[in-house]
Amino acid sequence: MTGSRFKGRLPIQPPASMGTILAGGSQGTLRYHVIQITYFANAQPPSDQSNIPIGDSRQNHSNERSMSLITWQEFENVDVRVGTITLVEDFPEARKPAYKITVDFGEELGLKRTSAQITVHYTKEELIGRQILGVVNFPPKQIGPIMSEFLLTGLYREDGSVILAVPDKAMPNGAKLG
C-alpha cells in the first residue's frame, strides 16, 4: 500500500474486490498525476501525531505527496476497463520516446487510441496481445497529431519510467474494475 497513510496494515482489511489502484502514465506532452484510491472502511488516520512514536510509519512526512481521501461514489466515477493491445506504432513526433497504442475494450467501447511513454521497458512486439487497464471516461485530449481517448494506467519507477498496470489473469475485454 505504497503512499497510504498506514504504511503497514490497514486498520481494517478491505474485501478482496477492493484495495489500492494506482493509475499513472505520460502521454505526449500531457503528464497525468498518480491517482491512489484506498478503502479505509470508515477508519480515520490519527489527527494528533504527538502520540505516535518517532519513526512510526503513521507519521506525516513533509516530503511525501499529500493525499486526500475520496468517497466510494467518487471512486465509482472512475471507469477503469480491461482491454487488449491490438496495434503499437512508433510516435516520432512525441517530445519523449513514446508509442501510439490502439486497444480493444470489447463490444460496448470498441477500439480506443492513446499514446504512452512506455518505451523503456516494452518493445512494440511484446505489447501486442497484452491486456492492460485503461481509464476510459476522460474526455478526448489532443496529444500532438493523435487524439488520446483513454489513459493507459501504469506505475512510476524512481527513474520516471512506467510499468504497466495489468490484470494478473485473462479477462474479457471491457471488464470493469470495481
Image (cartoon, rainbow, N blue to C red):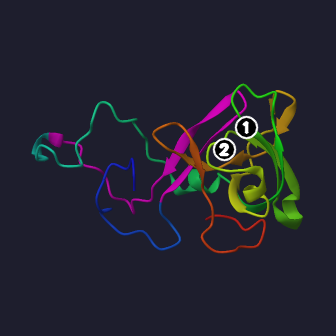
Q: Is residue 43 above or below residue 171?
A: above
Residue 127 placement (x, y as % from top left): 74, 56
The residue at the point 49 percent across, 44 percent down is: 157
Name the quadrant containing residue 140.
top right
Is residue 31 on the magenta stretch? Answer: yes
The residue at the point 10 percent across, 47 percent down is: 53
Q: Which quadrant holds the C terminus?
A: bottom right
Residue 95 placement (x, y as % from top left): 72, 25
- Between residue 128 and residue 167, name the one nearer to us: 128
Q: CA distance from mark 2 to mark 1?
A: 6 Å
The residue that disc 1 covers is 98
The residue that disc 2 covers is 118
Name the quadrant containing residue 139.
top right
Describe residue 69's horizontal placement relative to residue 88 as left or right.
left
Is residue 168 on the magenta stretch? Answer: no
The answer to whether the residues at label 2 and label 1 have Cβ atoms under 8 Å apart is: yes
Q: Which quadrant holds the N terminus?
A: bottom left
The residue at the point 44 percent across, 59 percent down is: 39
* Label 1: few (<14), some (14–19) or many (≥20) C-alpha neighbours in 10 Å: many
* Label 2: few (<14), some (14–19) or many (≥20) C-alpha neighbours in 10 Å: many
Q: Is residue 142 above or below residue 80?
A: above
| Count of numbered labels shown in the rendering | 2
- Between residue 149 and residue 157, name the one nearer to us: 157
What span is colored magenta in the figure? 20-49
